[in-house]
Image: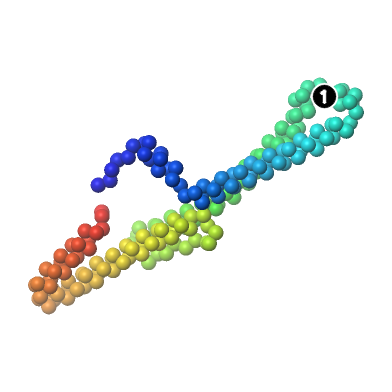
Amino acid sequence: MVEERSFKDRKKLNLTVKREFQRWMLKQVLVAVVFSSVVAAVILYFYARQEVVDSFFTAHIKIRRVSDLLLPVICAGSAVSLAVGVFLSLFLPQKIAGPIYRIEQGLVQIGSGDLTTVITLRDNDTLKDLAENVNKSTASLRSQVHEAKAGCMELEKAVLEGDSAQVSELMQRQKELIAKLIT
């Protein structure tokens, strides 16, 4: 019987995500943030440098408020951050969504009874370990089904031969095989 777990326990379990996947995702996000920060800093540097080169009097007349100076920099930084965010939202999910889709399609086939299904992902896909675990589980189920089929054929043969002792023994073995499968 499955135990009910509290919300706190489930929350703890969610923190045990694979470290490699966490590092990969963190690296992707950090690269995007650092890139947008560097571009914003470069824009600010060149904009500030341009203003410093001009004479003080010209700058004094041009700049009435600090926001007049910072508005173009803020707009440029926001535009770069938006562009990086859009890029990240378009391409990062594909690294996850593609493998999930392939695993999902494989699970649909397995669920329909095709235990010969093998889920294959590319070498650099992030969810390759998950696909391998699903394949191992399917292979284990396939093995158990083969054992049950072989036992059924032996049982049928014993029934046709009329060997009641062997029929009893084979029926007990079939019950044990089926008892292994938790439903």
Q: Find residue 52 and report its horizontal and vertical position in percent.
A: 85, 31
Q: Is residue 145 left or right of residue 63?
A: left
Q: Can residue 79 be seen in this view?
A: no
Q: Which of 162 and 130 is in front in this view?
A: 130
Q: Can residue 50 be seen in this view?
A: yes
Compared with 114, 100 (above or below) is: above
Which residue type does callout 1 highlight? Ile
Q: Nearer the viewer, residue 111 or 39?
A: 39
User: Which residue, as the protein is rendered here, is positioned at the far top?
Assistant: 64
Q: Find residue 141 and report its horizontal and vertical position in percent.
A: 32, 62
Q: Residue at x 19, y 73 (%)?
A: 154
Badge 1: few (under 14), some or many (20 or more) residues near its Cα, within 10 Å?
A: few
Compared with 110, 149 (above or below) is: below
Q: Find residue 116 and report its horizontal and vertical position in percent.
A: 37, 66
Q: Is residue 3 left or right of residue 40?
A: left
In the picture of the structure, the residue carrying the numbered disc 1 is: 63
Q: Nearer the viewer, residue 23 or 69?
A: 23
Colour mode of the rendering: rainbow
